Image (tube, coloured by chain):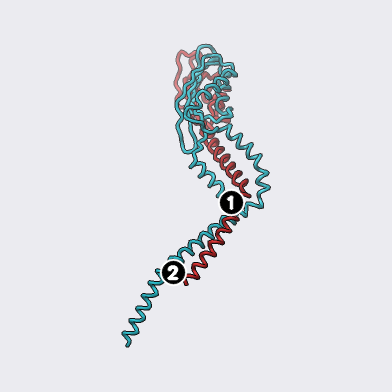
Chain colours: A red, B cyan
Amino acid sequence: MRFLITHRIDAQREENRQLGAALKDLRRETADADALHDLIADYLFRSKVAKVMREESSPAAEAFAELSRLPRDIVLTRAQANGMQLVASGVARSEADARKMVEQLGAMRFIANPRIARIDPAPGDPFGAEARAFQLEADLRH
Amino acid sequence: MLRLVLSCVLALAAGSAASYLLLVRSPLEHLEEAQENHLALQRQYIDRLKLRPNLPLLRAQVPAMNDLDKAAKIVLPDFDGMGAGPRDIEAAIRAIASEKQLTSRLEFSTSDWASKEFYYFRPFSIRVNGDFRQIVEFLQAVSTGSLELRLVKTASLQPVGERGQVTLSLDALAFRYREDEAATAERKAQTRATAKPQ
């Protein structure tokens, strides 16, 4: 019984050795596929990291460029992009002009959901008696 | 008599168990191990064999993939050591400022590289004055317009001095790819697993 089993083990080990040798040859033959897969892995992960970071980056330049298209009835005294949020303060010739500005900003590409967080009279402003100092908030989008 | 037969049977059973344990069990385990190895080798062989018909197609993709990978390495270069980078980043930023004709003094500061799972990042800050249009173009060139990946955390503009002049204060991050051996091996294993032919 033991002899039979030992014989079977030897036969199996020999078969494994032959299969191992064939596998080694096949690995050598298909090494190009490994190299390509490694290249793809590198590219995919690098691109994925870059994509995630790009999405998290504030599109500040684009948002500021859009703010510059506001009419002359609006004067901004500060604008800050903080991540995907925009806060700007300034003076409008009138409250109606401030509301109109919100409408205009709502139609822009990189600025979304604009709203006036605060609006107060701005006495003594060169814009005149109707002038309003405001603080604007908005979301940014890519 | 019955007692004698029972004793014989018990002795025979005990003898068989002992001889199984001594003579057969160990070789049987070796045989099972060899058979399991064979199955594992067979699976590997079949997986490899499935790659062979696609080899010409795969080889044809290598140049295009090399180009893509080269482009990805421009966007997110490899990390080249804790000491590397600050001068490169500063020089690139100053070159853009000069290109945009921002002649005022540009203040640049940076801190050390820090790491996350797949990348290193280095915070840097810029403060510069200029004409509104030039400043916005500069900001675009150092952030979304830059080939190399940079993340803008905060950017603020404030009017200063003459009409149309503003001050830009920018806090941003520069990145490098993290090529640790363990992380790389994990990525490659994942890609091979997803690319394995069915």
Identify which amino acid the numbered label 1 is placed on: Lys
The three-letter amino acid code for the residue at tag 2 is Val
Looking at the image, residue B88 sits to the left or right of residue B14; the answer is right
Quadrant location of the N terminus of chain B? Answer: bottom left
How packed is label 1: few (under 14 Cα within 10 Å), some, or many (20 or more)?
few
| Whether residue A25 can be seen here | yes
Which residue is drawn at the image coordinates 62% and 54% (left, top)? B50
- Residue A84 circle label: none
Chain holding disc 1: B
How many numbered marks, from 0 up? Answer: 2
> Considering depth in this image, is B99 or A119 the residue closer to the camera?
B99
Which residue is located at x 56 percent, y 21 percent? B138
Circle 2 marks a residue in which chain?
B
Taking B190 as reference, is B132 above or below it?
Answer: above
Quadrant showing the C terminus of chain B: bottom right
Mark 2 lies on a secondary structure that is: helix
Task: Find residue B32 and report its horizontal and vertical position in percent.
Answer: 48, 64
Of pointers 2 and 1, the one earlier in the residue sequence:
2
Q: Nearer the viewer, residue A41 or B93?
A: A41
- Cα distance in 3D space between marks 2 and 1: 40 Å
Image height of B57 relative to A64, above or below: below
Whether label 2 touches label 1, CB < 8 Å: no
Instruction: Compare residues A111 and A99 and report the one nearer the observer.
Output: A111
Q: Which residue is mark 1?
A: B196
**Residue drawn at the location 66% of the way across and 50% of the way down:** B54
In this view, A59 is above or below A123: below
**Residue B44 x/y as whole percent:** 56, 55
Q: Which mark is residue B24?
A: 2
